[in-house]
Each structure stands twice: as C-alpha cells, then as structure tokens.
Image (cartoon, rainbow, N blue to C red):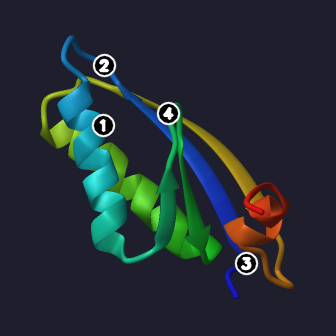
C-alpha cells in the first residue's frame, strides 16, 4: 500500500498554459503512479520520494517548454502505515 497522497496544481507562467498542464499530466501518467485528474488539481498515490521526483520532473519540463517560472501548489498526506485515494473517497462512490 502507498504511504502518500499528493495533490498538485501546477501553474506555469505564460499565456497559453493548457498545453503545458497537459504535458505535466503526461509526465504523471508516464511515471506509472496511480493518479486522478480533477478540475483544479491532480492527486497522485505512491511513495513520498517517488512522488516528489515526479513533481520535480514536471517543474523542469515546464521550464524546458518555455515557461520562465512555475508555481506548484502541493498538498501532502503522508501515512507510513498506508493510505489510498479509495480509502478516503469510497463512501462517496456508493
């Protein structure tokens, strides 16, 4: 079971940022971690170090694509005994 949930809203600077956000989500997808895209943020599930590495790669990619800077708003739930997105939301899915 994963030890962490991280929700991230990545905000690259620029005029047409939707393609950049799409690229950030692609990086999450290619990482192999479980994730869910929501309207204002994306939540990932996995080990803390692994998820931080994904966030680092996302930020670096935004710069590579021409954004002069990036704001990443991050929420972290770290629970070494294990946590999943489903654990927190299953009662709403019935």
Which secondary structure lies at badge 3?
A: loop
What SS does tag 1 mark?
helix
Residue 78 visible in the current orientation: no
| Numbered disc 2: secondary structure | loop
**Which numbered circle lies on residue 52?**
none
Image-quadrant location for residue 19 = top left
Where in the figure is residue 70, as x and y percent of width and height?
A: 38, 29
Q: Residues within 10 Å of mark 4 (few under 14, many from 20)?
A: few
* Left or right: residue 42 compared with residue 79: left
Disc 3 from disc 4: Cα separation: 24 Å
Label 4 vs label 2: CA separation? 19 Å
- Write down the residue under mark 3: 3
> What is the quadrant of residue 13 in the picture?
top left
The residue labelled by disc 1 is 21
Q: CA distance from mark 1 to mark 4?
A: 12 Å
Q: Nearer the viewer, residue 94 or 65?
A: 94
Residue placed at 70% from the left, 88% from the top?
1
Q: CA distance from mark 1 to mark 3?
A: 26 Å
Q: State whether residue 58 appears in this view.
A: yes
Residue identified by numbered label 2? 13
């Amino acid at each position: 079971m994963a030890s962490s949930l991280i929700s991230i809203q990545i905000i690259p600077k620029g005029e047409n940022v939707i393609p950049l956000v799409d690229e950030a989500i692609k990086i999450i997808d290619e990482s192999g971690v479980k994730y869910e895209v929501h309207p204002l943020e994306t939540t990932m599930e996995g080990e803390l170090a692994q998820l931080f590495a994904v966030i680092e790669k996302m930020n670096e990619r935004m710069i590579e694509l021409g954004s002069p800077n990036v704001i990443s708003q991050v929420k972290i739930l770290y629970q070494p005994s294990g946590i999943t997105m489903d654990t927190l939301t299953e009662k709403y899915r019935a």
